[in-house]
Amino acid sequence: MLIVLTVAVHPRLFAQNLLGGVVYGLVLALIALGLALILGLLGVVNFAHGGLFMLGAYGAYEIIAMQGLPFWVAFLVVPLAVGAVGVAMEVGVLRRLYGENPLIGLLATFGVFIMIEEATRARWGGTPLTFDLPAVLQGSITFGVGRIATIRLLTIVVATLVIVGTYLLMYRTDFGLTIRAGLQDREMAGFIGIDIPTRFTIVFFLGSAMAGLAGVLRGAETGMDLAMGFEYVLLAFVIVIVGGVGSIFGSVVAGLLIGIGVFVAPVMVRALATATGIDALAVPGIGGIVPFLIMLAILLIRPRGLFGEEGLLE
């Protein structure tokens, strides 16, 4: 009913914010997907994931604004470089923590996150930054009652392809089967000849590269600052909790749910305030608390999340 009211009162604004929410949700899903792979498959609470996302954005700035190379070079190179940073972190810090209390991994990765943040500050400073996009990504395309920026369209296409590719890799290939086998019984998987450490490192690379790619896409649209790492990793954890630990599908659904909620909720309360004449209903900043309201509601109804498996990390 409230959605119908919003469409009737603010149709164009609702359409624009719905689209913005889908784009934002796909970026969140891309970050959360990498985090979910690492947490669900490796059992490590990787707080440094936010730092890798931030490195993606700042890495694109380095290549485009400081080195003068095309955006497409950054688009291809930065995720791979961030994935390599993730591999170094996995091999140098986290490999010995598999199977330990998740709190130990959380503390270790929090320390890595602080190191990444301070290294970013030392290299690029603490002020917000942006970089120029190629002409093909600076325009927009008309759709229905609104327009969509080309960079947003690129984000939708790329995020969708990555999400589908990740699902196919993990659930439709022998590689994904061996990863999940190693999670269930690492000793037995090793006994039958599966190189579990190498496969876990590959998963960490993929998850880190996803964070780097999300950073490039988000930095291209909104720019970057030092707060983005903490902000987005916090939202990524919320998405993993809402979707269910270890669920790829859950991370995507939760990311879209939260992304759309953040953008649409302010329009809905504004429409309600307009229709009723009660200005107090248009609560300022309500979009910022929507992710946590959704998480609270889901956990009260289904403590393991929408699609989580009971006892996965026990």
Image: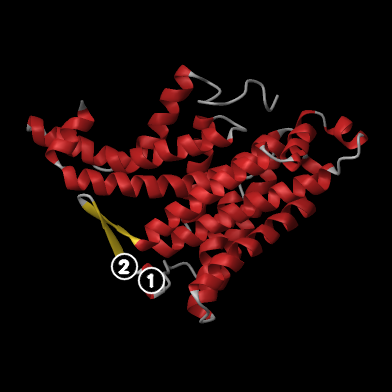
Q: Depth check: give the residue in front, 37 or 52.
A: 37
Disc 2 and disc 1 in contact, CB within 8 angstroms: yes
Q: Quadrant of the N terminus?
A: top left
Give me the C-alpha separation between circle 2 and circle 1.
Answer: 7 Å
* Residue under numbered circle 2: 139
Q: Residue at x 54, y 75 (%)?
A: 63
Looking at the rendered structure, the kind of residue marked 1 is: Val
Mark drawn on residue 110: none
Q: Position of residue 120 (x, y in %)?
A: 56, 66
Q: Residue furthest top?
A: 301
* Residue under numbered circle 1: 136
Residue 290, visible in the rendered structure: yes
Left or right: where 236 falls relative to 147: right
Q: Residue at x 57, y 43 (%)?
A: 33
Mark 1 nearby-residue class (10 Å; few <14, some 14–19, many ≥20): few
Q: Quadrant of the C terminus?
A: top right
Looking at the rendered structure, the kind of residue marked 2 is: Gly
Q: Position of residue 117 (x, y in %)?
A: 57, 60
SS type, badge 2: loop
Q: Residue furthest bottom?
A: 68
Q: Depth check: give the residue in front, 102 or 302.
A: 302
